[in-house]
Amino acid sequence: GRGVAQDYAQARAWYEKAAVQGNADAQYNLGVLYSEGQGVAQDYTQARAWYEKAAAQDDAQAQNNLGVLYAEGRGGTQDYAQARAWFEKAAAQGHANAQNSLGVLYDNGHGVAQDYGQARAWWEKAAAQGHAQAQYNLGVLYAEGQGVAQDYAQARAWYEKAAAQGFSAAQVILGALYSEG
């Protein structure tokens, strides 16, 4: 749609030229191609290597994606401590996905001691940026009274924010709330 046909192999070739010159955007984009298997065989080891190069230059997206690779065990090694470290670097730069992911780690006690207060703090940062999953997660905390006083009005308010963005899980809960009364 931008004057050329979509061609991941061509994209890879151009990204590689820039990446070997140290361009962080190109390094990140190569990581995405390898992670998604676009124009190349899916290879999480290669994705991680390119993300690490970009992350070393403080690319928050690459830092977040490294956190995802480690949290999900893509490439064979699930390591929540590494995931947390990368999410923290991206979150410190205001990356909402990383902030949400840190909240999930604290909520589940993965790589950290379970701490609903920390989960809430990270989700509030992401939610303030309009992150629908974080808004939904805050709704769950308030509905269940985890780390906060149980408050259905607060839960509903957070669910409504997420639902307004099309977050289907929040829409289902709101439907259930209104159908059950």
Image: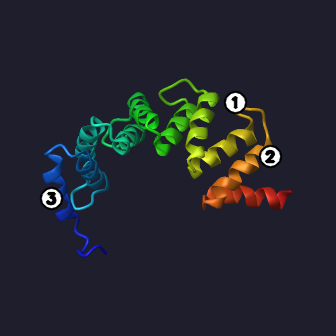
Disc 3 element: helix
Residue drawn 69% across the image and 48% down it: 158
Residue beneath disc 2: 153
Q: Tell me if mark 3 has few (under 14), some (14-19) or many (20+) residues whose alpha carbon lies within 10 angstroms of its own.
A: few
Residue drawn 24% across the image and 44% down it: 50
Do labels 3 and 2 touch, CB within 8 Å?
no
- Residue 66's spot in the image, x, y percent? 35, 40
Residue beneath disc 3: 13
Quadrant of the rendered structure where residue 149 is?
Answer: top right
Sooner in the amino-acid sequence: mark 3 or mark 2: 3
- Residue 19's spot in the image, x, y percent? 18, 48
Q: Tell me if mark 2 has few (under 14), some (14-19) or many (20+) residues whose alpha carbon lies within 10 angstroms of its own.
A: few
- In the rendered structure, the answer to whether residue 58 lies left or right of residue 155 reads left
Q: In the image, what residue type sits under mark 1? A: Gly
Do labels 1 and 2 touch, CB within 8 Å?
no
Sooner in the amino-acid sequence: mark 1 or mark 2: 1
Residue beneath disc 1: 147
Disc 2 element: helix
User: Disc 3 versus disc 1: distance between alpha carbons?
Assistant: 49 Å
User: As rendered, which of 127 and 74 lies closer to the eye?
Assistant: 127
Disc 1 element: loop
User: Disc 1 versus disc 2: distance between alpha carbons?
Assistant: 16 Å
Q: In the image, what residue type sits under mark 2? A: Ala
- In the rendered structure, the answer to whether residue 55 lies left or right of residue 87 reads left
- Residue 162's spot in the image, x, y percent? 64, 54
Question: Which residue ends up furthest to the right in the rendered image?
Answer: 181
User: Disc 3 versus disc 2: distance between alpha carbons?
Assistant: 53 Å
Quadrant of the rendered structure where residue 37 is?
Answer: bottom left
Query: Above or below — where is 116 with respect to 180?
Result: above
